[in-house]
Amino acid sequence: MLLQQLYRHQYLSRDQARTALIRIAREQCNPAETAAFLSAYNMRNINLEELKGFRDGMLELCHSVDLASCRTIDVCGTGGDGKDTFNISTLSAFVIAGTGIPVAKHGNYGVSSISGSSNVMQYLGIRFGKNGSELRKQLDTAGICFIHAPYFHPGMKAIAPLRKQLGVKTIFNMLGPLSNPAQPACQLVGLYSLDLMRLYQYIFQDEGKQFCLVHSISGHDEASLTSDLRCVNNRGEKYYSRQEISPLEINEEDLSGGSTVADAAHIFMSVLEGKGTPAQNEVVIINSALAIQVYYPELSLYDAKQKAAGSLYNRRALAKFNLLKNLS
């Protein structure tokens, strides 16, 4: 029994992990077994072979999306940090698109948070593309496409209610950024732990992906500016003090996403329309800048921040959102 292996703190092989995920997705395990398996990784760390195996299973079951002719970037976090911040990475995706960088944003409904990226997009009237041709049209028209995970990972549909009931991070938080069906050439990923950051680094380096991995020492799976920040990219590691990257003093309550999807949507549009608070704007800009640096590694962080700020304050990010919405 694989569960017994986990409870004995024994690691699974890559193939065992792949097989386990496929069996769970195909509902070949009873709900109790699945719940126990999903929560086991809150009690012990995952290793590299297990993470690779789970990812193999996810990609084997998903409907792939061919956007290879366009060098795209994704920006997302693992979630599971328990911070309930506003939709920083989704806002950053539109800011990045506003600088002319094509974005293939992978998103889902919130599981351990109140409002995931899909929740807020749906609330605001974005229609999700259901196949590669619709996503390509979004990308060609708006410079950004939104890849709603349930449409492209049908095997995960049966697990979603159980994940919601558990209400804690599971292996699927670890897998979300690794399983974008478009497999973009560039990624900015926020991670809730330094251990997981190291595993992502190994995987992305092996693939030759352009990447930046970020983890705030306060525990946020993004550059929250509430604490110092650790970044890992193709050039190595960088530790930023909070004062190095922003003049603002930002507290966790400044980043609250509200208590409902409606609250999250209101914050989202306020930022895009130039009515965000200084803290909200600054956090979106720094995360966007780190992603812009992935795409244009020759840029300094200062220059990348200037490009991001121009996209947000000159309403180019809002224009990208409206173009995407008009396709709906």
Image (cartoon, rainbow, N blue to C red):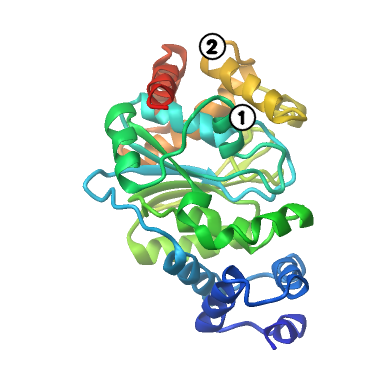
Count of picture labels? 2
Q: CA distance from mark 1 to mark 2?
A: 24 Å
Q: Residue 268 vs residue 259: left or right?
A: left
What's the residue at 70%, 88% (across, down)? 1
Is residue 143 at all visible to an observer of this figure? yes
Of residues 186 and 322, the one drawn nearer to the viewer in this rendering: 322
Q: Position of residue 135 (x, y in %)?
A: 35, 41
Q: Residue at x 33, y 40 (%)?
A: 134
The amino acid type of the residue labelled 2 equals Gly
Find numbered disc 1 in the image and state the secondary structure of the residue it sits on. helix
Task: Quickly name the residue at label 1.
Answer: 243
Can you tell which mark lies on residue 274?
Answer: 2
Residue 322 pos. (x, y %): 42, 19
- At a point 46% along the width and 71% down the height, the residue shown is 56
Q: Residue furthest left?
A: 69
Residue at left offset 47%, top offset 60% = 201
| 1 vs 2, front mark | 2
Q: Position of residue 319 (x, y in %)?
A: 40, 17
User: Nearer the N terminus, badge 1 or badge 2?
Assistant: 1
Residue 109 position (above or below residue 324): below
The residue type indicated by label 1 comes to Gln
Q: Quadrant of the C terminus?
A: top left
Q: Is residue 115 above or below residue 36?
A: above
Mark 2 secondary-structure assignment: loop
